[in-house]
Image: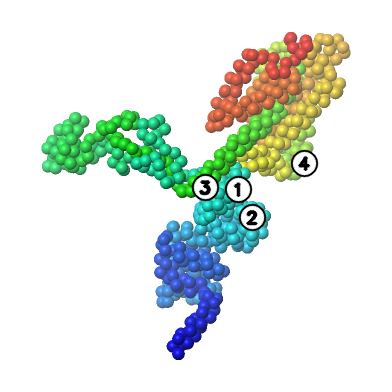
Amino acid sequence: MFRRLLLVLVSLCVLALPERAAAETLQDILQTHQAEVAKPGRRSVGVVLDDLVASGLPQALPFLEAWRDREIVQRDIDGLFFRAVDEGLLDLDTGAVLPVTDTSQVRPNGGVRRAIGDALVQFQLSDPNISKRLAAVEAIERSMDASQLAPLRASIDGETDPGLKVVKTRLAGMLAARFADDPAVRIDAIKALSGDLSVDVRATLNQILATTFVLERSADSDANIKDRYFGGTEAYPLAQAKPLLTEAGLFTPPTTASDLRNALTSRIEDGAVAGIPVAKLDTQETRRVAYDRLAAAGTVPPFSEPIETWDWDPSHISVGDYVVLEVYTEADPAITKAARTTLTAIEQKVAMSQAVDLGLDALSLASIYFLAAIGLAITFGVMGVINMAHGEFIMMGAYTGYVVQLFVPDYTLSILVALPLAFAITFGAGVAMERLVIRWLYHRPLETLLATFGISIALQQLAKNIFGTQARPLTSPAWLDGALVFNDVIAISYIRIAIFVLALLFLAVILFVLKRTRLGLEVRAVTQNPGMAASMGINPDRINMLTFGLGSGIAGIAGVAIGLYAKVTSEMGADYIVQSFMTVVVGGVGNVWGTLAGASLIGFLQKGIEWFNPSNTLAAQTYMILFIILFIQFRPKGIVALKGRAAAD
């Protein structure tokens, strides 16, 4: 009879369990852990958080947010928990607002709040609001904890945003590489990271390959050893070995002056130390005598002479058979081997990608220098005029683009309008300058240099008077925003790509003009032999005027392109005049292909020097100028020298 009654009671209890679980409320869970919720600690709060996460209750998420933000209070009369709101006390399960009574505020400390934040992440990973899911993923990226792997994996299949799903999958792979329970799963996850060149993946692998130093009596050990260091070798890790040897009693640290002074000061009795009056402890010798007496009495360690180098003096070190082992914190050798192989492969790909990225930067810089110098190559090459105001024509073109954008708000249309307008304005300015100044100074290079330098200063001051000294924006169209990204290392902005394309277009147009038009034929004739060209009916004076105007107009178009990339100020031309002259001289005066070659050489050279000395661009430019000077000594006519009579002038 008793046995039958017991079976009935057990059956009733079992049948009641699901109903109880279904009827369980958030308040029930909180009352179960009342003490931990009211006065949470970093070590005890984990049990509460685990139960809240496991409950799956929708009201657990707002409670955790309120708990983290210190908005939870406990009612004094019954110990129930509520959320404090302006209207009163908010019931955590029903949302009803109750009248305010005597309560005590729950104040979780910083460590508890961080733990609550980690628990919130598990709820937010599947939140309908994508911004909260993104915030949860970012929180996981910051903390990278083993407990986050399971909820992150569980949220991937239900993720509706394709981009965020990729991020979650990648982050789950990184967490699995570090924290998965199955070593085979970890190894597979590590190998899967080999194609990812991001910094955080490399950081994850480096954490797997983290090491520590231990002191062992034998080089043999069951630990996952990275390297072994024996005493007396140059590779011995001195900084890591000294604390280990000291702790093992194998190394006596030298007694410093501070150690000696503190030992004597703390043992003054009746105005003396070890029988020596304090007044006589005014020299290093007497202090040493007093210290040795204390050491003989056993009150202080024996005095150890300072050593300048790690010389394995037996008086300081007694190594015996000890060896310092550098061991991985990860115990499984297969995992560290996979991580080491993957990291090596990634670092090789990163090095190759950095070389490609550096090459793209150099190509972009070369295209900018080519745009800035091509106009000068025409005027300097054909006319032999040292135009120090060439940079100001670039500046005029950039300001033309800025003014056009003030009246044409569509940035794409404004650029299309600004390019021909900048050419027209700077072409006219170049023709006026040639007619008024340059034509009177032919074959007088010093006077030409001084005159154009004065014009340069005047144009800069005029720009300051009109536009002020602050940089003006020349905004690129929206389709030029952003960058073309190949991987986490290689990327190039669309503006730089546009400048490169524009440089190629310039090259094609100029070659067409010089090779396929009558103007180009006359320009080449005047360049090679002005006298013979004049005898053939060509007007050198007219050609010089048009050539100077053409070079100035090209500089104006280059100014619009450069203004999209660089700052637009009255001094912007000065930033390119030196490089423009170097480009023309190095490439070969009067030759378009030479200008292209010179721009490429200077662009790649400057980026290469900056790679060796990235923190000092001024030094890079200085080294580049020195290299150019040496280059001209060996090839004074440039990379692509002129042929014919002009080459001998």
Give the foreground label among 1 and 3: 3
**The disc labelled 3 sits on which kind of residue?**
Ile
Residue 27 as seen in the image, left or right of residue 536: left
Q: Which mark is residue 165?
A: 2
Secondary structure category for the residue under label 4 = helix
**The disc labelled 2 sits on which kind of residue?**
Lys
Whether the residues at callouts 1 and 4 have beta carbons within 8 Å, the answer is no
Q: Residues within 10 Å of mark 1 (few under 14, many from 20)?
A: some
According to the picture, the residue beneath numbered tag 4 turns out to be 413
**The disc labelled 1 sits on which kind of residue?**
Ala
Residue 649 as seen in the image, left or right of residue 49: right
The reply to whether residue 640 is visible in this rendering is yes
Vertical placement of residue 76 versus 482, above or below: below
Cα distance between the residues tagged 4 and 3: 58 Å
Q: Residue 348 lies in what quarter of the image? A: top right
Secondary structure category for the residue under label 1 = helix
Whether the residues at callouts 1 and 3 have beta carbons within 8 Å, the answer is no
Mark 3 and mark 2 lie on one chain; the one further toward the N terminus is 2
Cα distance between the residues tagged 2 and 1: 17 Å
According to the picture, the residue beneath numbered tag 1 turns out to be 192
Mark 2 and mark 4 lie on one chain; the one further toward the N terminus is 2
According to the picture, the residue beneath numbered tag 3 turns out to be 335
Give the foreground label among 1 and 4: 1
Image quarter of the N terminus: bottom left
Cα distance between the residues tagged 3 and 2: 27 Å
| Residue drawn at x 60%, y 62% as measured from the top left | 127
The reply to whether residue 283 is visible in this rendering is no
